Amino acid sequence: CVTIIGHDEYWTWEMRETIERYVEGGGHLARFGANFLWQIRLEEDGKRQICHKFKASQKDPVAGTDKAHLLTSAWEDHTVKWPGASTVGVNGAHGMYASWGGFAPNGQKGMTVYRPTHWAFAGTGLHYADIFGDKQHIFAYEVDGLDYTFRHGLPYPVEVEGQPDTIEILAMSPAVLAEDEPEGEGFRYYVRGSDHEGLVECVTGEVTPEGLAKYKYGSGMMVHMTRGKGEVLTAATCEWVMGLKRGDPFTQRITRNILDRFTAR
């Protein structure tokens, strides 16, 4: 079982290929973290990490070449086009920020359960629409999600080319990419709209009102998917560990269920 915790923001093309081969062959990936967003390249025997981020199309030497798929931009970039969900079941472009600054500062700090009969919730006693981890603030900082729709009270991923069709959304909460700026004294802002505009340009190729509206809001999700002979379960929030450190019995039991299943075979 490969286990990832915290903030795994930067991956190389080769890292993703390796993990996907491992899972397809029967491996298990347990991911308790978020911000799966940027492709990087490693140079000088791994001592140097390259990521041009929002300026990749102008500054990255591979732009416009036969290696343009290695552009050090977002995975959802219109040039790269390898959805993060292909590897971990979610992506950073449809998630982003929660519970700090002007990013849903009074929003939900836990996750809402939508598929309580899934094995990940066994023994928790959680029901549909219950919220877990709220007092411990497990849903905060950066989160990953998907574009989704609801049918009969249940969330489903919107179909995207290159995204597995086996993804199940188990729990989720709202997130924000564009920081709100409410009126009043003493309020501290962080990034305002800079990340919002930059990501829209990466993904769509330009900043337009339509693009800004499309990527203004997102979500953070707990998802499960199968890939080949293997499985992936992602609890896509950087602060999942707070549920363990602060003694949330639901977060603890869910984590144990995942690790027990993924290390048993």
Image: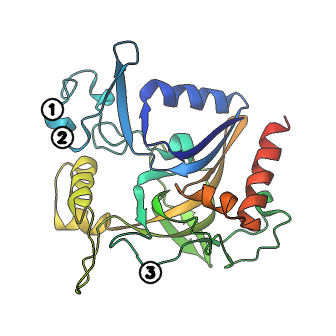
Q: Nearer the viewer, residue 187 or 170?
A: 187
Q: Secondary structure at mark 1?
A: helix
Q: Would residue 152 be found to the left or right of residue 258 on screen?
A: left
* Identity of the residue drawn at 36% across and 71% down: 103
Q: CA distance from mark 2 to mark 3?
A: 33 Å
Q: Which residue is mark 2?
A: 55
Answer above or below: position of 173 versus 159: below
Identify the residue at the far left of this view. Answer: 58
Q: Amino acid at mark 1?
A: Lys
Type of residue at label 3? Asn
Q: Position of residue 259 (x, y in %)?
A: 77, 45
Specify few, some or many for label 3: CA neighbours under 10 Å numbering under 14, 14-19, or 20 or more. Answer: few
| Label 2 environment density (alpha carbons within 10 Å; few <14, some 14–19, many ≥20) | some
User: Which picture quadrant has residue 195?
Assistant: bottom left
The percent position of residue 201, horizontal first and vertical second, equals 21, 51
- Look at 33% across and 36% down and name the residue there: 80
For residue 63, side relative to residue 152 (left or right): left
User: On residue 59, which mark appears?
Assistant: 1
Label 1 close to label 2 by CB (< 8 Å): yes
Q: How is the structure coloured here?
A: rainbow
Q: Which mark is residue 43?
A: none
Q: Is residue 222 above or below residue 176?
A: above
Q: What residue is shown at x 75% (from left), y 50% (from top)? A: 258
- Quarter holding the C terminus is top right
* Label 1, label 2: how far apart the Cα atoms are: 6 Å
Residue 5: x percent and y percent?
59, 45
In depth, the one of 140 and 215 nearer the eye is 140
Give me the disc on residue 106: 3
